[in-house]
Image (spheres, rainbow, N blue to C red):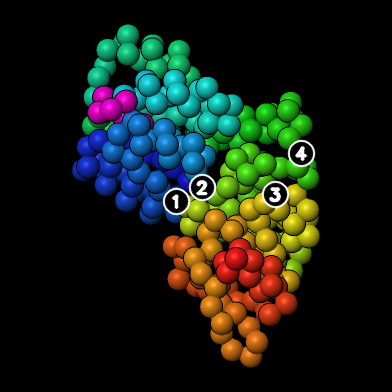
Amino acid sequence: MLTVLLIEDDSEIRKMVRDYLELQKFTVITAEDGSKGIELAEKFIPDLIICDIMMPVKNGFEVKESLAKKKVTDLIPFIYLTAQSDRTDIRKGMELGADDYLFKPFKIAELSNAIETQMEKREKLITEYSKKEEVKEKKDLTYKEHILLKVNGIPKFIKISSIVYVMADEKYTRVKIESGEKLIISKSLKEWEESLPSSHFIRIHRSYIVNIEFIGKVVKWFNRSYKVSIKNDDEPLFISRRYYSKLKDIFEG
């Protein structure tokens, strides 16, 4: 599932666009001003950004200018929403790297076509980037680093610190990230264990690796087992006494 960041201060437009995107099976993150939009973009690395121009705190131009400073966020396709038709504003947006404009009021069909075009462009950009930079998974990944993975055949940047847990699933792994998405990755749990930074990730079961930052609490369950609650997740993880010893020092020491 692809993620779209919608930055729009008008609550009615924000709701309308969000509802449409969710019907199209996108994961949608919203921000009501430019400053919050920058924060969310850097945190979640969305697949597409749809951004109003005239907003409080930081306008759409400032959002794009800030995100362009980092390669990983500069690669995100960027669509402006604007009620303005001034050619100077359009030229300024394009110079900053905007990919498209939608003028308010716009039709849903126009939004759909713009999104489809940018999704195709994004895939080509990231594929070219991965070839040029030879992005490789390495053993010394840092917690704040990004990793390029293929999700359903589509390249996607994932921030290491946003990974909540990794779960083994036969020859694949299921990766839950902070936004709530669960990604199926063609990579073994052992490979993850060797590449994720041990300072933040710990194997608590033969089938699970968990980010320590997202562990709520550990309580005794039954039959010599323990239950681990995950922040913002209703489903606990269960671990044996063998793996509990790894967590004991962290939560009891």
- Alpha carbon distance from label 3 to label 2: 26 Å
Q: Position of residue 44 (x, y in %)?
A: 49, 43
Is 53 in the magenta? yes
Looking at the rendered structure, the kind of residue marked 4 is Lys
Identified at 67% across, 45% down, the residue is 149
Residue designated by label 1: 27
Q: Which mark is residue 136?
A: 4
Q: What stretch is highlighted in magenta?
A: 51-58
Identified at 59% across, 89% down, the residue is 222
Looking at the rendered structure, the kind of residue marked 3 is Pro
Residue 57 sits in quarter:
top left
Residue 91 sits in quarter:
top left
Residue designated by label 3: 197
Kindly report which numbered mark, 3 or 2, lies closer to the viewer in this rendering.
3
- Alpha carbon distance from label 3 to label 4: 15 Å
Q: Residue 2 carries which label?
A: 2
User: Dot 2 lies on which element?
Assistant: loop
Q: Is residue 238 above or below residue 100?
A: below
Q: Which of marks 1 and 3 is nearer the N terminus?
A: 1
